Image (cartoon, rainbow, N blue to C red):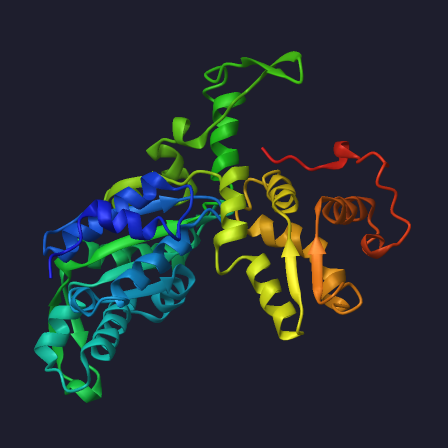
Amino acid sequence: MALPSPSQIAQALGKRVIGQEEAVREVSVALAKKLAGVRSGNILLIGSSGSGKTTLMQAVESLLAANQSLTNRSTVVRVHANVLGAEAEQGQPGEKLLLRLLNRARQQLGPETGIGRLLDQASHGLVFIDEVDKIRARLGGQPNIAGIRAQEALLTLIENEAVPLRLPDWAGGETVSVDSSGLLFVCAGAFEGLYDAVYTRVTSGRDKGALKPVTVVVAGQVHEELQFALRDWLKNEDLFEYGITPQFLSRFDAVVLLENLKEDELLRVFLGSSASGLRQSQGYFTSQGLKLEVTQAAARRVAREAACQPRLGARALKEVFRRVIRPYEFEPHAKAVNGVVRIDVPEVERSLVAYRSGDSHASSSKGWDESAPIPWEHIHQEG
């Protein structure tokens, strides 16, 4: 079987990852090289919560798992950075990461596979590290020892050094040296606070005045505003100040900033993702012998409200939809007509107004006045 090209990999990943074309392309090229046995550079993904970093990792795992010939070419493990930090305090986190890869390779290839083959598979693995910003070298202006040790441990693996590994008892228990040069690392994090730090630098800090206001027209009104995008202003020095050491950052060939999801992209996630709040609620109503219908207009209204919280990304969808669907889920049959629970724009607006007014029960009130104005001034806009 011919190996998939980067464009074919990107097409497959794009079915699950919405609105992150640059990140998908970078990962697709790296994965295609890896499957072909060619060394590829490591990737650092920076993006707000809910922008699709973990979804991208999961999509790669699913793609590899779906085809045995691809599975045999790469073992994947996904580790939360906080776990690495905790293991760093205990010592030898690099060895523990290799053991994860070795155990995963044994699951893939079978327990009868020879240790030489398993070590080869593990040493050419793909390592996803979630929330890598949690192992920053400084926290609150103070050194973060666990973070420093975790970064150093990863450097040992990334720098292609011979890593000593004590084999588990089922493999004989001896200590061997593992060449980690074949590993590919994809690290991802939200880097909370980085946006604000860079924004402050270019608006009121040492680079004050670098960001120029632009003239925009909104609803016929002309005004000036600052249009700030982190990707346009981020420097390596910002990441150093954040707590990513220069030695660690230099081991990534690509630093990719994920985009905040816009209304149309959020709508696609809401309607199409199997993990969306809508799909979960529909499953719940089905279990109650009912059908949940959400009109296209209502779905778009949910997406528009979620877009007002750009730093929450797709997670904002669940928060907004929960406000709408909660009273219906509490009394599903009371809200049904001929076995169908139908949500349209008025039901969404009612819930949003009730939430802003602090009345969590108002959404189920029968005295709703559809002509009442919506207090748009209370919608929270994030930077």
Q: Position of residue 306 (x, y in %)?
A: 61, 43
Q: Quadrant of the C terminus?
A: top right
At horizontal 44% and vertical 31% (from top left) the residue drawn is 230
Number of marks in the image? 0
At horizontal 23% and vertical 69% (from top left) the residue drawn is 98
Does residue 347 appear left or right of residue 149 in this picture? right
- Can I make out residue 248 in this image? no
Does residue 74 appear left or right of residue 237 in this picture? left
**Residue nearest the observer in this picture, 313 or 286:** 286
Q: Position of residue 30 (x, y in %)?
A: 21, 49
Residue reaching furthest to the front: 338
At horizontal 14% and vertical 78% (from top left) the residue drawn is 175
Residue reaching furthest to the right: 367
Does residue 303 appear left or right of residue 369 in this picture? left
Q: Position of residue 249 (x, y in %)?
A: 29, 43
**Residue nearest the observer in this picture, 253 or 312:** 312
Is 124 above or below relative to 117?
above
Rendering quarter of residue 123: bottom left
Q: Position of residue 221 (x, y in %)?
A: 67, 13
At horizontal 76% and vertical 61% (from top left) the residue drawn is 327
**Residue nearest the observer in this picture, 23 or 282:** 282
**Residue nearest the observer in this picture, 297 or 187:** 297
Does residue 343 appear left or right of residue 238 in this picture? right
Rendering quarter of residue 335: bottom right
Is 134 above or below relative to 291?
above
Q: Quadrant of the N terminus?
A: bottom left
- Can I make out residue 46 in this image? yes
